[in-house]
């Protein structure tokens, strides 16, 4: 009799533990953490056969909104990984129905996310329904991601969501990931998979460092020899126009902007293979060496070429931003070239070669401004400029007192993107995510107006030691630590210890969604990565 009671009590305790494990799941499992929320242990069961996404009657966006219609199908599969596909209308069932209703104030379904697009949303979950309201479809996408993370399974496989109310918006408007596709070519599928993971962490800018010294994989319609002679391989290691359109379209459906970078005048060795007279011939003792340095800023043909290239880029990439680069320019080749020195004397630059770079960048800014593009530059351009009137957005990337640089740029009245503390290209111990998590982009002395000029930050994954084989585990979940810093209220997310179990949970979610994120510590995930 005592033995039977022992078994029964054990089973009852196990059942109670299973119930508690489900009911104690709260909104704090969401990554990045929402701005404000209230939650409850009251929970509601969800079943795929009786779950439905729909539009509220007053919503400006209705059926036929391409972004949201696609998102409903995508998130249904993410919420119910083993559920039946297709839920275009409510399935009649003996089960209690649950409807997630969406309301959007502005019908921007066919456009692209912009630098000032609102991502604010409100989400409430109660018996039989979830109500998501947003100003734009891009905010609705962020809310759908949050809702998908609220849904969880108990130990017997049933799906639940807790009673919850959320008001949410990003702390910073610009939350970027940089991928370098020149030093190692990244297949389009690897880029698309990264865009998926970016959406899960609520990143909203894909900074595509598409070309550099090693290779020029972008296939230009205007200058086909750039990739024909400058790519690793002219057929297999290029991004055709159709590939670029696919990336931009895929990103748009996830509320992600695509910011192209054509870095010059340095980092352009691959350019010179397909465009003669573009690079500066280097000299020694008055004789040419047969090697080449940065773009030649003294030739009118240089700016004619750049005007044509950026005109094409403006027609291909719809975003209002374009990155002009301007970093790490080796001045020794310019200083060795007699034609460059003669040009500098003519322009009154003397031997001030940073002034020559400023002259060149100003020419490019004028070209891109005429194309209605806002230029982004690396911080050297700002550092080398006496007058900053032509600059708009500066990306701070150098180590050292990067907040000092942020403050200098903001004091000059320019917008700032912070990248310095979020370079993830080199391997490190998995626990160094905490170093990325404890960055405070606004932790400098300055006015509120100056701090508003810090528009966000960027995680940079340079390609010297990264290709498709290690892209995802090197990026995730470390990049997610930066994502929460750029989205969430810093006062609520100041504790690494409190963040750790949430990030572990989110890493497991990434695995279940097919992202091979590296482990943070010893442990296991309920749904381990299956390698597909």
Image (cartoon, helix red, strand yellow):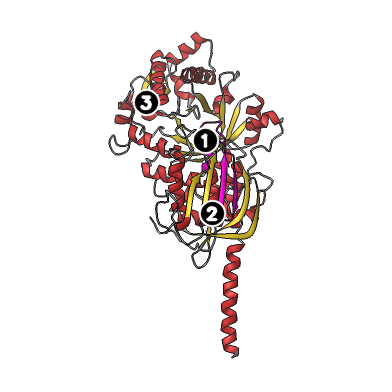
Give coordinates of residue 506: x percent, y percent.
Answer: 54, 54
- CB contact under 8 Å: marks 1 and 3: no
Q: Which residue is mark 3?
A: 291
Would you say 443 lies left or right of 136 here?
A: right
Q: Is residue 334 positioned above or below 129 on the image?
A: above
Of 298 and 345, nearer the camera is: 298
Q: Earlier in the sequence, mark 2 or mark 3?
A: 3
Rendered image: mark on residue 254: none
Point 35% across, 19% down: residue: 277
Q: Is residue 93 magenta?
A: no
Query: For the view shown, which residue lies furthest in the top direction?
Result: 346
Sequence-first tag of 2 and 1: 1
For disc 1, the marked residue is: 60
Instruction: Give the total of numbered labels.
Output: 3
Q: Which segment did they paint magenta?
A: 114-141
122 magenta-colored: yes
Relative to 191, say whether 385 is above or below: above
| 503, above or below 402, in the image | below
Residue at position x 64%, y 28% in the image: 410
Looking at the rendered structure, the secondary structure element under dot 3 is strand
């Amino acid at each position: 009799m005592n033995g039977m009671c022992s078994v029964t009590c054990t089973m009852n305790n196990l059942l109670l533990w299973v119930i508690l494990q489900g009911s104690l799941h709260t909104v704090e499992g969401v990554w990045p953490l929402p701005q404000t929320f209230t939650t409850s242990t009251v929970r509601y069961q969800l079943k795929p056969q009786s779950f439905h996404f729909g539009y509220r009657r007053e919503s400006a966006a209705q059926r036929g909104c391409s972004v949201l219609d696609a998102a409903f199908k995508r998130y249904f599969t993410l919420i119910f990984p083993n559920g039946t596909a297709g839920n275009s209308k409510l399935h009649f069932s003996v089960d209690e129905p649950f409807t997630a209703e969406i309301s959007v104030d502005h019908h921007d379904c066919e456009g692209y996310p912009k630098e000032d697009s609102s991502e604010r949303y409100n989400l409430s979950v109660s018996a039989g329904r979830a109500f998501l309201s947003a100003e734009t479809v891009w905010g609705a996408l962020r809310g759908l991601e949050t809702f998908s993370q609220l849904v969880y399974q108990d130990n017997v496989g049933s799906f639940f969501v807790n009673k919850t109310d959320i008001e949410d918006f990003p702390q910073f408007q610009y939350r970027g990931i940089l991928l370098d596709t020149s030093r190692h070519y990244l297949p389009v599928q690897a880029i698309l998979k990264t865009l998926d993971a970016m959406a899960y962490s609520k990143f909203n800018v894909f900074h595509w460092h598409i070309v550099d010294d090693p290779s020029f994989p972008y296939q230009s319609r205007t200058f086909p020899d750039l990739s024909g002679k400058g790519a690793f391989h002219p057929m297999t290691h290029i991004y055709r126009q159709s590939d670029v359109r696919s990336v931009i379209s895929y990103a748009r459906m996830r509320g992600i902007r695509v910011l192209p970078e054509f870095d010059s005048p340095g980092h352009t060795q691959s350019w010179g293979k397909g465009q003669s007279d573009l690079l500066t011939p280097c000299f020694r003792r008055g004789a040419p060496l047969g090697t080449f340095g940065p773009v030649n800023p003294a030739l009118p043909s240089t700016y004619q070429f750049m005007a044509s290239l950026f005109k094409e880029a403006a027609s291909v990439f719809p975003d209002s931003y374009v990155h002009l680069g301007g970093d790490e320019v080796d001045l020794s080749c310019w200083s060795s070239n007699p034609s460059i020195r003669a040009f500098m004397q003519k322009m009154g630059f003397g031997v001030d070669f940073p002034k020559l770079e400023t002259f060149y960048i100003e020419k490019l800014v004028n070209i891109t401004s005429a194309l209605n593009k806002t230029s982004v530059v690396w911080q050297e351009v700002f550092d080398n400029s006496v007058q900053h009137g032509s600059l708009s957005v500066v990306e701070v990337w150098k180590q050292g007192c990067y907040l000092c640089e942020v403050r200098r740029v903001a004091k000059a009245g320019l917008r700032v993107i912070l990248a310095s503390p979020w370079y993830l290209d080199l391997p490190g111990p998995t626990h160094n995510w905490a170093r990325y998590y404890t960055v405070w982009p606004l932790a400098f002395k300055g006015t509120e107006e100056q701090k508003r000029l810090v528009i966000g930050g960027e995680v940079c994954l340079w390609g010297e030691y990264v290709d498709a084989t290690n892209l995802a585990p090197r990026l995730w979940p470390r990049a997610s630590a930066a994502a929460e810093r750029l989205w969430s209220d810093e006062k609520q997310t100041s504790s690494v210890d409190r963040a750790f179990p949430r990030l572990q949970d989110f890493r497991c979610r990434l695995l279940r969604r097919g992202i091979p994120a590296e482990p943070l510590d010893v442990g296991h995930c309920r749904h381990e990565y299956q390698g597909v």
